[in-house]
Amino acid sequence: MRKIKVLFFYPRFVEEYKALLEKNVPEADFMICTTREDMEKYAPEAEIALVGMTFPQDVFKRMPKLKWVQVMAAGVEGYFQNAEQFKHIPVCRITGAFGKYMAEYVLAYVLCFCQNIPRVVKAQKERKWDPFRMEFIHQKTLGVMGLGHIGKVVAQKARDAGMRVISWDMVMAEVPFVERQFGVQEMPSFLKEADFVVLTLPVTPATKNLVNRDFFQVMKKTGYLINICRGAIVDENDLVEALRSGQIAGAVLDAMKEEPLPQESPLWTAPI
């Protein structure tokens, strides 16, 4: 029986993935790549490409037998620039898998800020007795921007934890655990109510640099930004300015425009 040729490129945890794939998908012949040279070597035979967001797009032009691209991520915006070459080839993303993980990520930081854990750790290091009045998440409003799968799971978990949950999106959705949904023209009202603004939006021309100086000026000065989608949505220079000026209380970035973050980036030294 002929095995399907699958080119695999995902630099992180490559050995773990290799073992899992070969064990659980015996009908495929996995061509594991760790360098560009490997990719170019195996490209002519590849029928399926199982890749991450960092896969070099020009290599696809060397795959005459390619029938399917499976991206190991929730977003595929990096492939839009090559939409023409994928006209007859499906490009698929992963959905329904990341919500529970990202919800825990968000709640961890919400609790960190409300309980002021950095202050506690600092006091311990300094051997300083430092009582203070903490805050509680059941008194806070979490605002979710984007009610796709991840946004819905984040919203539900936050509601289960006792938070009031509101949302902003370009379309309305059936989500009983969201107290109020705001439409496109209602962003200022949405931002004025949210203590924590969580970004779960896709990157499109309409959302690129959507979170900018004007956005921060409307947010609560006690509010926090948590980005768990794409770095392109946030104007990083405006974010640094907002943090340094105290326009907002803090930010958490799971994604930046350039990764790894350059050593010279002001984000490294910006206030939390």
Image (tube, rainbow, N blue to C red):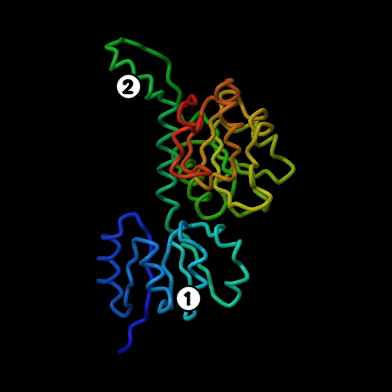
Precedes in sequence: disc 1 or disc 2:
1
Q: Secondary structure at mark 1?
A: loop
Measuring from the top left, give residue 248's x and y in whole percent: 57, 26
Q: Where is 23 relative to 123, above or below?
A: below
Q: Residue at x 61, y 61 (%)?
A: 81
Q: At label 2, which amino acid type do we have?
A: Val
Measuring from the top left, give residue 22's x and y in whole percent: 27, 71
Front position in the image: 197 or 45:
45
Question: Residue reaching furthest top?
Answer: 129
Q: Nearer the viewer, mark 1 or mark 2?
A: 1
**10 Å neighbourhood of mark 2: few (<14), some, or many (≥20)?**
few
| Res 121 label | 2
On screen, residue 138 versus residue 86, left or right, reads left
Measuring from the top left, give residue 140's x and y in whole percent: 52, 30
Q: Residue at x 51, y 55 (%)?
A: 149
Q: Residue at x 41, y 67 (%)?
A: 50
Name the residue that disc number 1 marks: 63
Front position in the image: 177 or 120:
120
Q: Where is 53 relative to 118, above or below?
A: below
Number of numbered discs overlaid on the protein picture:
2
Measuring from the top left, give residue 251's x and y in whole percent: 51, 32
**10 Å neighbourhood of mark 1: few (<14), some, or many (≥20)?**
some
Rendered-image quadrant of the N terminus: bottom left
Q: Secondary structure at mark 2?
A: helix
Quarter of the figure with residue 231? top right
C-alpha separation, residue under disc 1 versus residue under disc 2: 53 Å
Q: At label 1, which amino acid type do we have?
A: Met
